[in-house]
Image: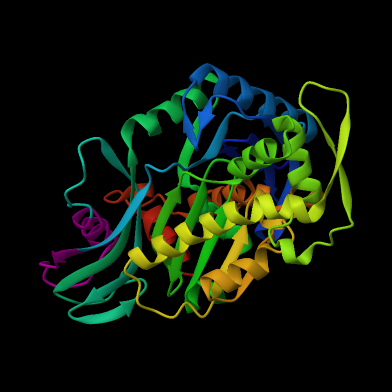
Amino acid sequence: MARRRIVAGLDVGTSKVAVVVGEIAEQEEVRVIGVGEARSSGLRKGMVVDIDSVAKAIQSAVEKAEQMSGHPIETVYAGITGAHIASFNNRGVVAISRRNREITVEDVHRVLQAAQIVPVPPDHEIIHVIPREYIVDGHDGIMDPVAMSGTRLEVEASIVTGIQTAIQNLLKSVSRAGLQVEELVLNPLAAAETVMQPAEKELGAVLIDIGGGTTEIALFDEGTLWYTAVLPVGGDLVTSDLAVGLRTPLAQAEEIKKKHGCVLAELMPSDELVEIPNVGKQEFRRVSRKTIASIIEPRILEILALIKERIYDSGYKGMLPGGVVLTGGVASMDGLVELAAEELQMPVRVGLPGKIGGLTDMVNFGSYATVTGLVLYGARQVALTEAAPTADPLLGGFMSKLRLWLRDFFN
């Protein structure tokens, strides 16, 4: 009986912890076979502040996913976010000194290492080094330089960093839940796996994932990540505004946001009423959806203004014809596409998880974009590992895997 190839993704968010189990089927199709979710606690704005609480939430979500999938979960591809995330672009250069001047996988590894030689704050560490293009003897636009001839190899790479303690606290939480992290993956990089089209990344586009405690921004150009940032604001602020403005408990404010929320007051009629429970009382009041939208709209405008500022500060000079892809729990709110298009001055669409089969009805929401993307990312790494030859005694499986990964990254 053939061994089942199983991949699990773990998204530890401010509002919820989600686990998705995928099975790699024939033709490398990935099918969802298990989903687990638990209310998140112990996080603030995407960062762990209580390891035990986070570990318990992870355990709860994992148990549900295991029961549904019928498969034990031991390792996960885990997403990471938080305002501590930073990115910048850098260049690495190495000489090809061997007699035949042929570029090998080892040379690619060396040039990627050279790209990491940058002044990084002592409390930060590098999470990703993503090659954007290679340059051989001054000729740019090369995606895979292996086997080419040259004397000088350069790489343009995007470097993503995070605070060491934040990374360690996340890893400790996962470990305390009884799991091993196969790889840490930047949340918006994972979400892009499932909600963005290759053509959008190639043209130039921005992924905006508005979650509970954070808003993640990832700018793609020529098929790869160019810039990323995480803002410490999200849908939880909208919930808080509603709780204060409507004088109702936070739990009810969250439900009102999900069921009746709209970000454009002008779209809402004044005569459409919603029952609102009072704080500490059994009584209800009736409030118009227009009033609810008038509370939500200023906060969303503030978030969009911060996004626009970050995109401008990134230094990107292109036109971004691929526009904006919105995802995350807030993305489904009425009027957000129209308001975002007006404020950001770009075409906007909502991105939902795709490129995955199985229990799609359970994960076809913006709030599951990151965790389904983690499964797809993990499935690709599994396929590359299985395909990598290990016969090369000099480079071994790691270098072979690196070559395949570099080639696959740009497809």
Q: Is residue 398 rendered to the left or right of residue 264?
A: left
Residue plotted at (19% across, 56% down): 114
For this rendering, which residue is in front, 7 or 348? 348
Q: Work out whether 188 lies above or below 102.
A: above
Residue plotted at (69% across, 29% down): 38
Q: Is residue 122 rendered to the left or right of residue 275?
A: left
Q: Is residue 136 rendered to the left or right of residue 126?
A: left
411 drawn magenta: no
Is residue 127 shown to the viewer in this render? Answer: yes
Q: Position of residue 48 (x, y in %)?
A: 47, 28
Residue plotted at (13% across, 74% down): 151
Q: Is residue 91 rendered to the left or right of residue 298?
A: left
For this rendering, which residue is in front, 188 or 177? 188
Q: Position of residue 355 (x, y in %)?
A: 68, 61
Classify residue 402 by image quadrant: bottom left
Colour option used: rainbow
For this rendering, which residue is in front, 326 or 261? 261
How many numbered tags mark residues here?
0
For this rendering, which residue is in front, 103 or 256? 256
105 drawn magenta: yes
Is residue 178 shown to the viewer in this render? Answer: no
Q: Position of residue 44 (x, y in %)?
A: 50, 32
Q: Residue furthest top?
A: 52
Placement of the N terminus among the 4 image quadrants:
top right
Classify residue 409 by image quadrant: bottom left
Q: Work out whether 11 lies above or below 321.
A: above
Magenta segment: 92-115
